[in-house]
Amino acid sequence: MKWLRFAGQYISTGINPGDGFKVVTNIRMSNQFSTMPLFGARSSGSASTASFNMFYTNTFVVDHYEAKMQPDYGGSGSAATLPIDFSTLPGGEKMIFSIEFGKTTKVNGVEWTSPTDNVATPYPILVGSISNGASADTRKMFADVSDFIIYNASGDVVFNGVPVPTGSTEYSVTPAPSNCYWDLVSGSYKVQSGGTGVVWYDDEDDDLAEENSTTLQGVDYGLKVLAEGDENTAYMNSKYPLFGADISSPASQFKTYEFTLTGFNAEPSPPFPAYTYDGNFYQGSGVTERTAYTIDTGLGGSTVKSVIVQNSEIDNSVFYGRAREQLFNSGTGDNINSLLNPKSKTALAASPWSTLYLADGSTGDIQGIVSLGTGTSIAKYDTLADFNGGTLDAYYFTQPKVTVKIDAAGILTVKTSVPYNWIQRAFIIGSTTYRARWRDWIWYQGVTIRVTVLNTPYVIE
Amino acid sequence: MDPSRYMERTLRDRGDYGLKIARKGYDLLFAADNQLLYNSAFPVLQIVEFITDDTDWEVVSTGSYTFWSDFNGNTLTRWKHSMRRLHGLGHPPMIAPLTASGWTSVDKNISWNLKYIYYEKTFITETEYNAFISSDAPTGTFVVFNIDIDTDVEYPYVDDGIDTEWGQKYDYGIKHLLTDDVNSMDPADLGLNANVQSMLVVAVKVATIEDKNRNIYLPAGIDPEKLSPFSYIKQTNGRWIMGGVSIQAVSGYRPAVPAAGINYYTLDGQYFAPKCSLVLVRLPMLSSDKTNASFNM
């Protein structure tokens, strides 16, 4: 489909709407958060006595936006709203709306019939904006419009605009002066009539390949298995090697390693600064990383591999935390160096997950535990000697991690990281000296990670 | 689950023709699928080619172009390198990256249709463009598989893997020579080679924008835990790109999570594009050697 793309510009069709008129077009747009005039004309601004126009609206309702197409056919108060759901689309991704606008309007098949007929105005139908009486609506439209066809009450086409790029001679020996419509009815170009910037052109059909364009390459011998009912498609062609493991290899080329995390290796050693006796809390966070396991898979040689990494579920039952409090208070006589368990904990949950990676030689670091969500995990502690007011809630924005890697020599390495937080405070008041250091950390225990490696015999030259 | 959302079953018949070779020790007449060395009906994963930084491409266009800002309609100068490569398969193939990040960071510079593979990269600055060109336009590494991602099909080959004695030498079988040396067993010299036990496609499911809510695929006869999904999206210009896992916004598909009671896949790329394809791949019918270990974090 060919499109004219608008971002505040508009084109006048030169056609004034009469009663019974109809527009047929397609509009392609991403989610927009403002009201946009799409096309049409009305006798004045808001509350027009006659209107033949269409808006896009998006209003904030309680806690979310509601996007709608708003056909406004007839006098004031005849506007309808046809809801659109952009909510699940990736940002910037566009939807295409097939629009028939008239007494009965259809947007992607959803219908609405206007109760009134008073649409005739002495102002032209604009594309990319609307005529508010003699002037164009000043709000910008950000959307693409395909062919734009206007029918009169008799069903005759009175305007049939097809998008053309600058310089096109597809419809006339006179090159198109800009990206614009060529009106098949009047045989003339309809160019940008207002707005800053320029109208753009997009032809998304320009590289569509034709069916039956198969080009068979390579050897003229071998074996094929054709797809049922389609002699042009070989779903097996013996000239192509198989992605798999060679069983004539002397050692297994297909191995599974299952790792179970059993606890934390060593208490983290945060980079506590020297004590500053000012009463302030100093704090920070970090991770302790280590190589937890290595094994020679015997699958070296820079071959192409398939690696499936799977993790079991992450929930509170496998989520652990611990803290160490060190506190000296000469006034109270406290001299504490104790490990503490949390009174409650909440993991950032993650589903059991499986991902297949294809790798050439070294895999690089692969996440052993996949957490699709983002957020925090929490461990809550009762502290000793009223440190931090007696309780401390430790938040973790970084979660315990496991990465696996198989290098070109076939060595499988598992690395782990344990996140931690630390707090330090010290002061001297009179004869009382107070020093406190706190560290807390989290880990997983009982989680399994399975790595399945299939080694192909192929090396990419 | 609303039954109207289940995708139509498109199970391919096993057929009564073709070529089968039994593994040593098995009688071909009675051999199960996992006792075969080769079966021409198996939906094997065949490597058409590896695309690397050294692959030859046809440069379609390169240099500066006029970029239109859809924010204000102003035009700017930007740079683009656009190239293509004939794959000659007659159907859009399955293409996968050979990187550790793989499906967690989809490369949208690569796209393809039933004839060509395209690699297009745009640059905001001329310096970036020049650096790319002076590095011989590196693309990264991909593998192209001879799988038609545009045809909805399911296959009945779901047997578990069985134990295998490695290092077996067969004095029978089938191999396709890509060399004059008929004795060669070098994988680089061979196309089809029955000694290579292939990964298999269990299903290719295609959802369309015309019937976008018919998008639930429930695998039959095999636990989703044994399947690896690859998602693809057909754009309005006819080219396919890689899809991703949908976390919040739709990106391609939502995975089956059997341990959480979700035994089906949900295709969703067709909510913003004409088609969405999900290729489900399984490991060969071999059992793997297993090693268990436990350690502290």
Image: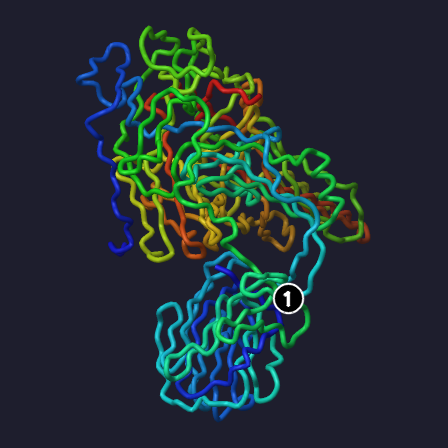
**Image position of B217 (left or right of B231):** left
Q: Chain of mark 1?
A: A
Q: Is residue B237 visible?
A: yes
**Image position of A174 (left or right of B162):** right
In depth, the one of B104 and B205 nearer the eye is B205
Give the residue drawn at x 50%, y 17%.
A299
| Above or below: residue A123 compared with residue A336 | below
Most distant residue in the front direction: A173
Q: Is residue A293 visible?
A: no
> Residue A176 in the image: x percent, y percent?
61, 65
Most distant residue in the right direction: A430
In depth, the one of A102 and B266 nearer the eye is A102
| Above or below: residue B85 compared with residue A240 | below
Most distant residue in the bottom direction: A49
**Image position of B173 (left or right of A272):** left
**Image position of A8 (left or right of B162):** right
Q: Secondary structure at mark 1?
A: loop
Could you classify mark 1 by the number of other residues whose Cα lies within 10 Å: few (under 14), some (14-19), or many (20 or more)?
Answer: some
Amino acid carrying mark 1 in the image: Ser
> Residue A365 in the image: x percent, y percent?
57, 32
In depth, the one of A225 and A380 nearer the eye is A225
Residue named by callout 1: A178
| Above or below: residue A36 compared with residue A393 | below
Name the quadrant containing residue B177: top left
- Quadrant including the C terminus of chain A: top right
Name the quadrant containing residue A167: bottom right
Give the residue drawn at x 54%, y 26%.
A360
> Residue B237 in the image: x percent, y percent?
49, 52
Give the residue drawn at x 59%, y 26%.
A291
> Residue A290 in the image: x percent, y percent?
61, 29
Name the quadrant containing residue A73: bottom left
